Each structure stands twice: as structure tokens, then as C-alpha cells.
Image: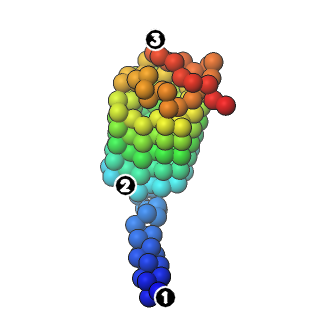
Amino acid sequence: MKRLIAAAALVALSAAPALAQDASQIARVQGGASCSGCNLFQADLAYRDLPNVNLSGSRLRQADLSLATMNGANLSACDLSVANLFGARFTGVSFRNANLREANLVGGYFGGADFSGADLTGAILSGAEMRRARGLTQAQLNTACGDATTELPAGLRVPRCR
């Protein structure tokens, strides 16, 4: 039994570094470079101006993108779960097939952003400007929440946050 526990602990420890953030990749992105498929776990990108950056397929879980400007960025297939996008500008950004589970989109601007296939489960959309967003479906919005100031495309609605 002790050998089994030791083996399980060894496997768990050997897998941990693969999930840790990559400081050199984060620094490159903070400087404005694209980094497709990078591990940007818990990256601090708050207040950054990162136009047209390509972070497709990257891990941005728990990242801070608050008040950033990322117009024209490619965030398709990104893991943005539990990320903070508070008050950020995402004009024309691709969130296609992105994981935005439990993300904070409060007060963000998403004009022309593409949410096709994005997972919005548990996302908070209060005060978000999404009127010109594309690819949003009622099924996606039913899993998120917002408030009276959330602006959505005509015919769509979002449940109120509790």
C-alpha cells in the first residue's frame, strides 16, 4: 500500500511542472508578442495594450486581463476559465471555441467579437457590451449570468446573476 501511495505521489509531482506557468512566455506576451499554444497560467496582462496578438490555443486560466486592450486578438480555443476580463476592450477578437467558464467579463467591450462555440458556463457578463458580438447563442447565455446593463444582440437574453 505504501508503494502505491508513493507511486501516485511521484506521478502527481512529475505532472505538476507541466501545468505551471512559463515566465518567459508571459514576458514575451507582456511585451506584445504573439504566443500561440503557450502556458500563460495566471499571467498578469492587466492594463496592457496588445492589439492583434495571437494567443490561440493558449492556457490563460486565472489570468488577469482586466482593463487590457486586445483589439483584433486571436483567443480562439484558449482556456480563459476563471480569468478576469473586467473592463477590457476586445473589439473584433476571436473567442471561437474558447473556455470562458467562470470568467469575469464584467464591464468589458466585445464589439464584433466572435463567440462561436465558446463555453460561457458560469461566466459573469454584468455590464458587458456585447450588442455587436457574433456567434452568441441563447444556449450559451443560459449558462452565464448578467444584469440589466448587459447589452446583447437583439433577441438574446441572459439570466440575472444572484
In the picture, the disc for residue 154 is: 3
Mark number for residue 2? Answer: 1
Q: Indicate the secondary structure of the residue bearing disc 3.
A: loop
Q: Residue at x 57, y 38 (%)?
A: 104
Q: Which amino acid type is shown beneath numbered disc 3?
A: Ala
Question: Going from the N terminus, do you reach mark 3 or mark 2 first?
Answer: 2
Residue at the top extreme of this rendering: 154
Task: Specify whether 89 is left or right of 77.
Answer: right
Residue 95 has which mark? Answer: none
Tell me if label 1 and label 2 are in contact, CB under 8 Å: no
Q: Earlier in the sequence, mark 3 or mark 1?
A: 1
Is residue 107 positioned above or below 6 on the image? above
Residue drawn at x 39%, y 35% as measured from the top left: 118
In the image, residue 102 above or below residue 137: below
Whether residues under marks 3 and 1 lie with C-beta atoms below 8 angstroms apart, the answer is: no
Q: Position of residue 62 (x, y in %)?
A: 53, 50
Residue 90 in picture, x, y percent from top left: 46, 31
Disc 3 from disc 1: Cα separation: 61 Å
Mark 1: give few (<14), some (14-19) or many (20+) Cα within 10 Å.
few
Q: Amino acid at mark 1?
A: Lys
Residue 151 seen in render = yes
1 or 2: tag closer to the N-terminus: 1
> Residue 86, percent across and down?
59, 36
